[in-house]
Amino acid sequence: MSAGAGLLLPGAMPAGMTDPWESGVRMSDDLGNIDLNILIALNALLAERSVTRAAERVFVGQPAMSASLARLRSHFGDPLLVRQGRGMTLTPLAESLVRPTQQALAAVQAVMG
């Protein structure tokens, strides 16, 4: 490896990346407190529209998925999934979270490999 290869000069960004400070994105001090497992649970709940099936999808027990849903409901201040007949349906807020949740997980997977 040549000297300096792979190193960035101060203020330089890798090709294809933008500086979050210049793009207006604020880095939160709370970022370290984010539990990626809850994002995985959210994605499964949004996709399956069932606590039981979401739990099976990510290989956790139904009580654990129910607890995740309770945390998500508290976080968003929204029920996210509501009973309708024999099934469950997404609230408007939950519908609006489908794509961003998928994108966030795809971004994490791209970074982590």
Image (spheres, helix red, strand yellow):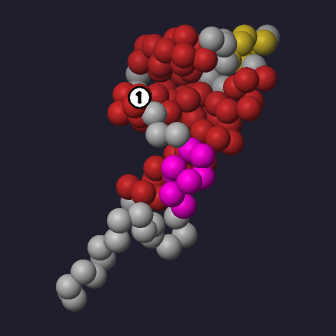
Identify which residue is drawn at 35% across, 65% down.
10
Q: Which quadrant of the rendered structure holds the C terminus? A: bottom left
Residue 7 occupies which quadrant of the picture? bottom left
Horizontal side of residue 98 vs 51, given as left or right: right
In the rendering, at what x and y percent does residue 26 appear?
Answer: 52, 40
Q: Is residue 23 rendered magenta in the image?
A: yes
In the rendered image, residue 28, in percent from the top left (x then y), is placed at 45, 34
Question: Would residue 29 be seen by someone viewing this image from the given angle?
Answer: yes
Q: Residue at x 50, y 73 (%)?
A: 15
Above or below, 110 against 21 in this view is below
Report x, y in % for residue 39.
Answer: 50, 33
Q: Of residues 11 and 104, which is closer to you in this image?
A: 11
Residue sitting at 66 percent across and 13 percent down? 78
Quarter containing the N terminus? bottom left
Give percent across and percent down for residue 44: 56, 33
What amino acid is found at the position of numbered circle 1 in the picture? Asp
Membership of 57 in magenta stretch: no
Residues rendered magenta in the picture: 18-25
Q: Residues within 10 Å of mark 1 (few under 14, many from 20)?
A: few
- Secondary structure under tag 1 reads helix
Q: Main secondary structure of the magenta part?
A: loop
Residue highlighted by disc 1: 30
Q: Is residue 19 left or right of residue 46?
A: left
Q: Does any portion of residue 62 appear in the rendered image? A: no
